Amino acid sequence: MRRSTGLLLVSVLGVSATACGSSEPATPAPGGAKAVTITVACQPAKSAPKERKAWDDDVATFMKAHPGVTVKSTDQQPCFDPKTFGPKLAGGQMETVFVVPVTNYADVIAQGQALDITQYTSSIKNWNDLRPDVRELVTKDGKVYGVPNVHYSVGLVYNRALFTKAGLDPDSPPKTWAEVREAAKKIAGLGQGYVGYGEYSGGNTGGWHFTQAIYGRGGSILTPDNKQAAFNSPEGKAVLQNLHDMRWVDNSMGNKLLVGWESLMMAMGSGKVGMMLGAPDVVTDVVNKFKGNVDDYGITGFPEAKASLSGGEAFMINPKATPEEAKAGLEWIDFRFNTVGKGRFDFARGKANGNPVGVPDNDVYGASPTGKAIQEDRVKNASLPVDHYQPYVEAAATIPPKAEPVHAQELYAILDVAMSGVLSREDAGIDELLADAETKANAMLAAKG
């Protein structure tokens, strides 16, 4: 779940082929070949004119290089809405090329709503450089159903300026939860309105962050067979106890419940929140969307991490697509999202447009030649202080990734109640909260079969 784009988002995903921006007709196909029109997610909003122009320029460049292909772009914002995604998918209303969050891969494939693209993967020139473990997520029974687009893991995002103001060393961020607590107390001690450590309590984001925290402690949300809840455990209790103590003993978390992705991001952008769990894209969003000072933010590894929640998204092709449409769709994905120095990896253009460049927010290519080339170009064109993110880069390379659980959104909603409980009531019973959540989760899992 990626919140920027909501987990997560998070995610850039169009939900209706009827909400497409217009584009100029393609030039005639060579040799009398059949003309092809594809719809693609997801054109940036009109409220982001530079990003929208970059997208439209890429569409024009792509169509010029592919005579006979017309590209129509979905401009619905937000692109992904969990409430409408299922019905739109079941109704066959997705674009030719659409984006699916990692939590939905299995369901989309199982429902037959993604085309088997095994025979077309050669259209992705750098296909073999994509991380094998990430490719495996879009593969079932030896057949490929998607092109991985984003992969990330969680770390600790922190405000370097507040660290300095509180007498902490911003170049030595916390490595343990005890150090996080101490740093949070010092930041909260700066005065009214300062929050040492920010956390979610609702909107499915509370359960999402609970999952991040329990993974870091070595726990799990579900049993290995995905049939039963596993979070009512010593690790789960440690997560809630730590938050309870930071909130009520240390008074380092403020007194405002943060519900939904935007609430904590706004607080972080205000410059008065010291730390939060998050992927590197948090920095991009805090700076881009919530007016944070670009020089203030750093990222480090997950404290004491035995594993780190990983997330991401992949492009999939509508199963109704003809072979010609499928091939054109994959060529668009290759051009816009998988070519070094082009499309989303045109960091020089991004810097010229004033976008934050330099955050290591996508590890889909790993240490492959393509991955190294992308990273070199990102650093070359960085508009952000890349050295502020090096602790995260070094830590992330050593921490095993762990995927979000099946039925993640339903589980997150259930776990929101436990998170809200410890952050809103000093006398909240942790054992009771977890037991109640376990009962509800097991009932949901049984109903899902």
Image: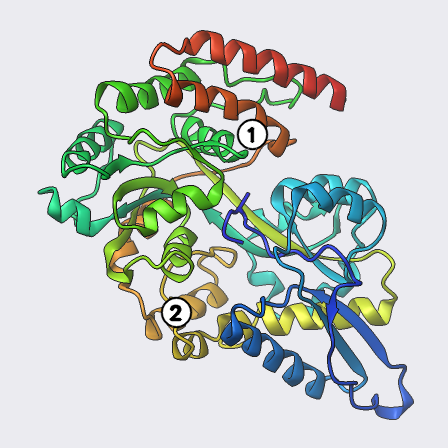
The residues tagged by marks 2 and 1 sit, at their Cα atoms, a distance apart of 34 Å
Discs 2/1, front: 1
Judge by depth and name the residue closer to the eye, 92 or 371. 92
The label shown at residue 172 is none
Q: Which residue is mark 2?
A: 378
Q: Is residue 169 something one can see in this rendering?
A: no
Identify residue type, mark 1. Answer: Tyr
Identify residue type, mark 2. Answer: Arg
Say above or below: 69 vs 201. below
Element marked by disc 2? helix
Using residue 261 as the reference point, say whether residue 330 is left or right of it. Answer: right
The N terminus lies in which quarter of the figure?
top right
The C terminus lies in which quarter of the figure?
top right
The label shown at residue 412 is 1
Residue 357: x, y in percent?
Answer: 38, 67
Which residue corresponds to the image point at 33% horizontal and 14% vertical from the top-left?
426
Q: What crowding class fits label 2: few (fewer than 14 Cα within 10 Å), some (14-19), or many (20 or more)?
A: many
Which residue corresponds to the image point at 53% horizontal and 74% vertical from the top-left?
49
